[in-house]
Image: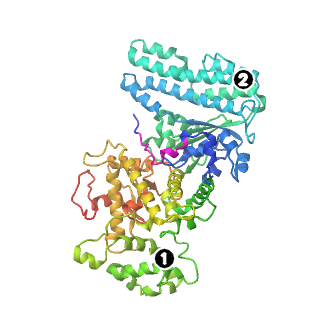
Amino acid sequence: MSINYSAPSPFESFNARALSAPLVARTFVPPGHFSRLVQRRHHLLIGPRGSGKTTLLKMLQPAALNAWNHIDAEDYRAKVDYTGVFIPTDISWQSQLTSLTEGGLTSAEALLIVRASFTTSVLLACVTSLSYRNNRKTTSKTGFRQIEISKISESDISDMLGGSWHLEVDIPSLTGLQFALRNRLSQLNSFANRELVLGITGRTERLSSAQSLHLSFLPCVSLFLDAVEIAIPETSGQRWALLFDELELAPGSVREELFRALRSVDERLLFKLSISPYSREHTVLSDPSSAMPGHDHDEINLTYANPNDSKDFCDALFGQMLGIDGWEMTDADRILGESEFAREHADSGDGFRAYGPKSRVGMQFRKLYDSDQSFQKYIDDRDIDIERLHELPSEIMDKNVRKLRSLVAVRTTFRTPDSVHENTRRRVRGRRAPALYAGSRALFAMSEGNPRWLIGVVSQLLIQVDEKDRRVPASLQSHEIQQVSDRFRALLKTIPTPMSPKSFRGVLSILDEIGLFVFDQVVRDSFTPDPVGSFIVDSKAPDWIIDIIGKSLNAGAIVYVPDSDASPMLSSLRGKRFRISYVLSPYYEIPILQMRAISLSTILKRRSVTLEGQMELGDTNDF
């Protein structure tokens, strides 16, 4: 049985899976990925839960593209020369497979039933999409992908496919065909339940005589296209895109079949598959006979290792939300304020004025210089006048000062002065939800380009603001960010980790160790301009830690930081670099910043974990 690496999202109420295509289109802002996804290519859409995979796929449906009222909508409609068929993964497929095998069926017998359900669901989605295209029955704003299907054509399609798919279609129409397919899904469920009761005697004969169990989805879809072209000649040669969503929830055999379908010989079919980034079963894609990235299909990574890459998308989505809520379109910085972690305004102007002695940044540097001997030594060793940072030459500023801004902000906020530490032995200030993480750039970075996250947070902020003020106070932002972080951690607690030692509390056991290590590097320890903020899963990591890291990755709790040419789909985590998601930065009180990496085993060894899963005494003061 395959390991399920799926995980919940903190914003399920904003899940596009439950929304109709027109509702998805209402708030859709096209990210850069969308212009790639619409191309006439096979695609793997890769990202953690909540990263927008469902929305992107649903937007390729005719119903969504018809309803989409965006400045670029017409350009995108012109590029989509195929009919998108959205096929959500039914989570019951995996549970049914498990219950059947536990009930006494062999894996092969159980798979026959589950794959029949999968095939029937695909065919139902195809017929439903064709029915939507019928302009006799569907009112469309733009007429996108609309055709006229006569009652005779419907009857012909129904007759041809009813026989080929071994269906009893009472009413010869697309509606009748849809009903027959839904009826088959119900019958397959009943058939499975009966097999659990009837036992092994006669099972081989029953399974072999059930014709619906032996249909393969790909030949059946090709027959569907053939029947449509015969009955409606104007559709001859038209392409159809099968949009399979959340394949991480599907049985492994279904995923494998779809991966191999990326080398489909039917030129009328496109496959666009969405899936989480990690599974040990992704090795099927490295098989020499499997589809090759860049040749047979393209991979689209929805994770932004660098937050600057998602800035334009977040700005656009924020602006769209303002318009929907009746706000005047304006700059995000004006409503949310500037962020301590944004460099744009500090690095502009003649002579780096934002680093002057009276500026906010300049005063932070001075405060840390006066209270932290290790930082003072760093500045003095480089012959830098703390009062004249703004007068430094550009090359010295770039090398020794500007890159420190985020580190100085975090260290000043959370570290007690050396004098206080000498008297009280307390190195960390009292925990709170500081304004440090407020501001548009911080908020956007913490979203990781995740539309569900951003919509959830911004929606809560906008409904709490006085309409006359038109600004969101930092205190309000901090409170909402803290709430989000707490909800996210609560959801991470629900992820099962059966492989981990009993002394560990699941996913958070490892995330907390990593977060505390980074905090020590940035705040507790002597100042360094290059602290550790990411990690590499090394060869010493046991399987139970690999399991936790994999589930954290698919949940969006950690982010893969790949080499420039690396695939975002991972079948192994060893040798790969990761960082904690910025949404957890306020909890761990660490910078929203890309920092250097060391091995995971080094982090765990220094803190309080041995690789055998035993706890050692560690420094846990203030936590």
Is residue 7 one of those drawn in magenta?
yes
Amino acid under disc 1:
Arg
Which residue is under mark 2? Answer: 154
Question: Disc 1 and disc 2: Cα gap in Å?
Answer: 68 Å
- Vertical placement of residue 342 versus 457, above or below: below
Q: Assign the magenta stretch its main secondary structure.
A: loop
Taking the image as shown, residue 78 lies to the left or right of residue 520, namely right
- Report crowding for label 1: few under 14, some 14 to 19, many 20 or more residues within 10 A (C-alpha): some
| Element marked by disc 2 | helix
Is residue 295 visible in this depiction of the protein? yes
Q: Position of residue 404 (x, y in %)?
A: 44, 74
Q: Position of residue 249 (x, y in %)?
A: 47, 38
Which residue is under mark 1? Answer: 402
Q: Position of residue 546 (x, y in %)?
A: 36, 49
- The mark nearer the N terminus, 1 or 2, is 2
Residues rendered magenta in the picture: 4-16
| Element marked by disc 1 | helix
Picture quarter containing residue 16? top right
Q: Position of residue 389 (x, y in %)?
A: 47, 84
